[in-house]
Amino acid sequence: MQSPELRDKIYQAIEDAKGIDIKVLDVRESSDITDFMIVASGTSSRHVSSVADRVAESMLKIGSKAIGVEGKREGDWVLLDFGDVVVHIMRPDTRDFYNLEKLWGEIQESGALKR
């Protein structure tokens, strides 16, 4: 599966799980590690973990297993690595503190993805 298609399917899974404030960062020009980062928030630690579970389950159904998952037990910040797409799901205060969108540059607003 090409990275834009994977990005879109992950985005949809986050939306379906009621993830909030979803941002897609195109990091192809600044990273050799991944093509896209998706950053989203959950309303609580439980919600963050639930969104992460939903994404992992949805991707398994289409044959894409996460290479790695970090932070699920704590639920403040869960990272799911799908190779070409890295997903960060965070509680809002954790997201504000780390501000990955600023760190990684230009933000592609949800609903305005480059295809």
Image (tube, grey):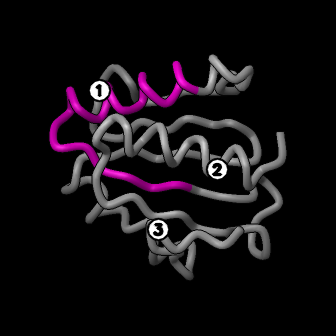
Q: Of discs 1 and 2, which sits in the foreground? A: 2
Label 2 element class: helix
Q: Quick check: 79 left or right of 41?
A: right
**Residue 81: image x %, image y %?**
63, 37
Which quarter shows the N terminus?
top right
| Type of amino acid at the residue the image marks with label 2 | Arg
Q: Which residue is mark 2?
A: 7
Vertical position of residue 15 compared to residue 73: above or below: below
Q: Which residue is mark 1?
A: 74
The earlier-in-sequence mark between 3 and 2 is 2
**Residue 36: image x %, image y %?**
66, 58
Label 1 element class: loop
Q: Which residues are magenta?
A: 38-58
Q: Which residue is mark 3?
A: 111
Q: Residue at x 68, y 36 (%)?
A: 82
Spatial separation of the CA atoms under disc 3 and disc 2: 13 Å
- 43 is within the stretch colored magenta: yes
Dot 1, how many residues are within 10 Å of its Cα: few (below 14), some (14-19), or many (20+)? few
Determine the main secondary structure of the stretch shown in magenta: helix
Dot 2, how many residues are within 10 Å of its Cα: few (below 14), some (14-19), or many (20+)? many
Q: Residue at x 46, y 68 (%)?
A: 111
Q: Quick check: 51 left or right of 5?
A: left
Spatial separation of the CA atoms under disc 1 and disc 2: 25 Å
Report the number of numbered marks: 3
Which quarter shows the C terminus?
bottom right
- 56 is within the stretch colored magenta: yes
Report which quarter residue 21 is drawn in.
bottom left
| Type of amino acid at the residue the image marks with label 1 | Glu
Q: Residue at x 65, y 26 (%)?
A: 66
